[in-house]
């Protein structure tokens, strides 16, 4: 549906009896509701990972909350209405018959039907050299038993008709499944990028490889021919508990916590049309007593883990946990809701049995139980503290262990949420102990400079009493720590200049004061070199001796130096744990005309 047009909705039970106006259809009176264009302002063109189009707020009923816009009657389930940020049209063959190529103007969304058998729908559009178009179809994602095939060809005039000159592309395979065997999100809908190499007319033919034997109506599709639109979509998934044999199990999981318990939620992102930027994940709504720290999924990565925690003194609660993903795209803040993945029925071995999954626009979380979670592990600085370390350096993070009941054995907690630390031996807590230190030697793990987040996890066995009157029983629990934030610097030292850019005239000399900042107790030797980013720069650079970790750069510009902005880069290097570490400081020098 084009969001610039008024929308006419026809159906039964849309309005309370006696309200609104009707439309006659097949001898019956149908409710008729008109939604003006202004009610669609702000609606986003977005499709869930299973292809079910997101509802526009106010246009889909809930059993207990009828829609104020359409006025759906209580107890009546509404239909989702698709919103397109491009022209939305219908296949002409469905409306008026005929089989001539239908001329389109991208970007456009075409709703059509694979009918009758062997049906091939043909669409033409004009394009210029260098233009790019995504050609994609949605049908299998919408629940139809179809296997679409897309053929793109270049055509030319032959008298009053157009004939095919050459084949440009064929798309029959769907994109990579961003799920996995335990939670599949695959479909049979293909898509592909077409780059136009010369001006002309192009033809898109679409057919259904399954549509061979019977004339079946209702095999619908939506074909989109659109220009690239970098963006993303995301879904969350409850992590399976550790103490079960989950090697091949697709388990039904719920977000149910005891006071003090921490649970991980995986967030997976699909990057579309080349979007590669960082994505922020945060909560917009959660029940009282639930803490949900925000996380950032770095550039070019597609997965993160958000740790939710019930307060140690939290009372029983139940409610929605709404997560959103936000990012900057083309200078604008984009925010989308994150759907939640659910396994509908538990499967013991996903290699032998199909896994039935769904994505829900809502996720629910609860806090229950009279007793707190029996084994907690957390770092002494809390979730907001950022532990800092240099590349090739070492960081020591103290942890506390809070034990309830008979959970007194020694425990080992591994590092999760950070793939490059997955082989770290982890944190070992001795029997009966309540303190331990996690030491990470970055000389053994290639963590590039940047911000990271990880958590500890492990299994423990002990006796647990659910309430004061109950009997203590043997229990195996999966324990997770709150998130630990880690910042890795390029080196245990840095160069600092109070002013990032300077001006100099031809024939003059400039003095730039530089300070060497040392971190983490580093006392080793540091060597500093300079270089120009632009070629042909004839500036002369000298420096004073390093004294008290400070020195001056003297820059001299010849009278004949060209007027321009020159980039000067300072590079400091040193040795740490046998590895060379380097940090840089960029400066700008604006060369002015000689007086």
Image (tube, rainbow, N blue to C red):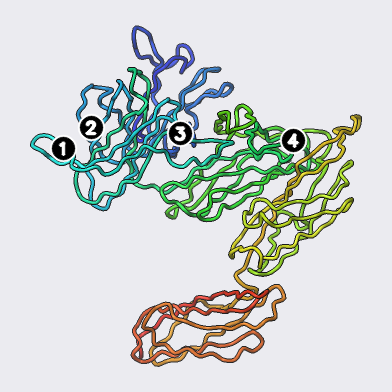
**Residue depth check, mark 2 versus mark 1: number of the one nearer the observer:** 1
- Mark positioned earlier in the residue sequence (2 or 4): 2
Q: What is the count of numbered marks?
A: 4
Q: CA distance from mark 2 to mark 3?
A: 27 Å
**Residue depth check, mark 3 versus mark 4: number of the one nearer the observer:** 3
Query: Toward which corner of the image does residue 248 lie, by quadrant?
Result: top right
Label 1 packing within 10 angstroms: few (<14), some (14-19), many (20+): some
Residue that badge 4 annotates: 367
Residue that badge 2 annotates: 102
Residue that badge 1 annotates: 163
**Residue depth check, mark 4 versus mark 1: number of the one nearer the observer:** 1
**Is 550 positioned to the left or the right of 377 in the image?**
left
Q: CA distance from mark 4 to mark 1?
A: 66 Å
Q: CA distance from mark 3 to mark 1?
A: 33 Å
Query: Residue lying farthest front?
Result: 352
Query: In the picture, which quadrant includes the N terminus?
Result: top left
Tell me residue 247's x, y (percent).
65, 39
Q: Are marks 3 and 1 in contact (CB under 8 Å)?
A: no
Residue that badge 3 annotates: 187
Tell me residue 299's x, y (percent).
51, 56
Residue at (27%, 29%) from the top-left corner?
A: 121
Query: In the picture, which quadrant includes the C terminus?
Result: bottom left
Find numbered disc 1 in the image and state the secondary structure of the residue it sits on: strand
Label 4 packing within 10 angstroms: few (<14), some (14-19), many (20+): many
Q: CA distance from mark 2 to mark 4?
A: 57 Å
Find numbered disc 4 in the image and state the secondary structure of the residue it sits on: strand
Label 2 packing within 10 angstroms: few (<14), some (14-19), many (20+): some
Viewer-proximal residue, 558 or 151? 151
Q: Are marks 3 and 4 in contact (CB under 8 Å)?
A: no
């Amino acid at each position: 549906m084009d969001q610039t047009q008024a929308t006419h909705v026809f159906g039964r039970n849309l309005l309370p009896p006696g309200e609104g106006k009707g439309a006659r259809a097949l001898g019956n009176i149908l409710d008729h509701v008109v939604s003006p264009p202004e009610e669609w302002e702000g609606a986003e063109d977005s499709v869930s990972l299973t292809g079910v189009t997101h509802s526009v707020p106010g246009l889909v009923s809930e059993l207990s909350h009828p829609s104020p816009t359409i006025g759906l009657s209580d107890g009546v389930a509404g239909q989702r209405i698709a919103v397109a940020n491009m022209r939305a049209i219908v296949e002409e063959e469905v409306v008026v018959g005929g089989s001539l190529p239908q001329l389109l103007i991208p970007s456009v969304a075409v709703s059509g039907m694979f009918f009758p058998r062997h049906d091939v729908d043909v669409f033409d559009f004009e394009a210029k050299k260098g233009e790019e178009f995504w050609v994609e179809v949605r049908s299998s994602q919408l629940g139809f038993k179809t296997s679409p095939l897309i053929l793109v060809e270049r055509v030319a005039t032959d008298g009053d008709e157009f004939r095919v000159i050459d084949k440009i592309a064929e798309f029959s395979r769907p994109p990579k499944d961003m799920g996995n065997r335990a939670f599949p999100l695959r479909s049979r809908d293909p898509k592909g990028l077409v780059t136009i190499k010369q001006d002309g007319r192009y033809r898109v033919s679409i057919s259904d490889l399954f549509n061979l034997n019977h004339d079946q109506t209702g095999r619908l599709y939506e074909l989109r021919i659109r220009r690239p639109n970098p963006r993303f979509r995301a879904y969350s998934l409850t992590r399976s508990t550790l103490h079960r044999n989950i090697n091949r199990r697709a388990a039904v999981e719920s977000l149910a916590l005891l006071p003090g318990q921490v649970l991980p939620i995986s967030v997976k992102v699909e990057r579309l049309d080349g979007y590669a930027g960082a994505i922020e994940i945060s909560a917009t709504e959660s029940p009282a007593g639930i803490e949900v720290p925000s996380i950032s999924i770095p550039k070019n990565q597609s997965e993160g883990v958000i740790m939710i925690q019930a307060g140690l003194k939290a009372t029983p609660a139940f409610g929605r946990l709404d997560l959103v993903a936000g990012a900057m795209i083309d200078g604008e803040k984009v925010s989308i809701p994150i759907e939640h993945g659910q396994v509908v029925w538990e499967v013991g071995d996903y290699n032998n049995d199909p896994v039935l999954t769904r994505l829900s626009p809502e996720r629910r979380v609860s806090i229950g139980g009279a007793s707190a979670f029996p084994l907690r592990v957390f770092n002494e600085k809390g979730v907001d503290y950022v532990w800092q370390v240099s590349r090739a350096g070492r960081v020591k993070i103290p942890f506390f262990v809070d034990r309830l009941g008979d959970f007194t054995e020694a425990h080992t907690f591994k590092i999760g949420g950070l793939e490059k630390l997955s082989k770290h031996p982890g944190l070992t807590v001795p029997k009966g102990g309540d303190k331990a230190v996690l030491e990470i030697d970055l000389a053994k793990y290639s963590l590039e400079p940047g911000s990271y987040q990880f958590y500890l996890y492990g299994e423990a066995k002990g006796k647990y009493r659910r309430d004061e009157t109950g009997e203590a029983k043997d229990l195996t629990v999966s324990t997770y720590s709150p998130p630990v934030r880690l910042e890795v610097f390029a080196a245990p030292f840095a160069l600092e200049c109070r002013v990032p850019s300077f001006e100099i005239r031809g024939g003059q000399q400039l003095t730039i004061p530089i300070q060497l900042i040392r971190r983490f107790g580093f006392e080793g030797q540091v060597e500093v070199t300079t270089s120009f980013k632009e070629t042909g720069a004839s500036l002369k650079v000298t420096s004073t001796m390093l004294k008290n970790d400070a020195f001056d750069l003297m820059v001299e510009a010849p009278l004949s130096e060209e007027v321009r902005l020159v980039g000067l880069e300072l590079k400091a290097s040193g040795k740490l744990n046998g590895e060379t570490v380097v940090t840089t400081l960029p400066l700008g020098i604006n060369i002015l005309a000689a007086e």
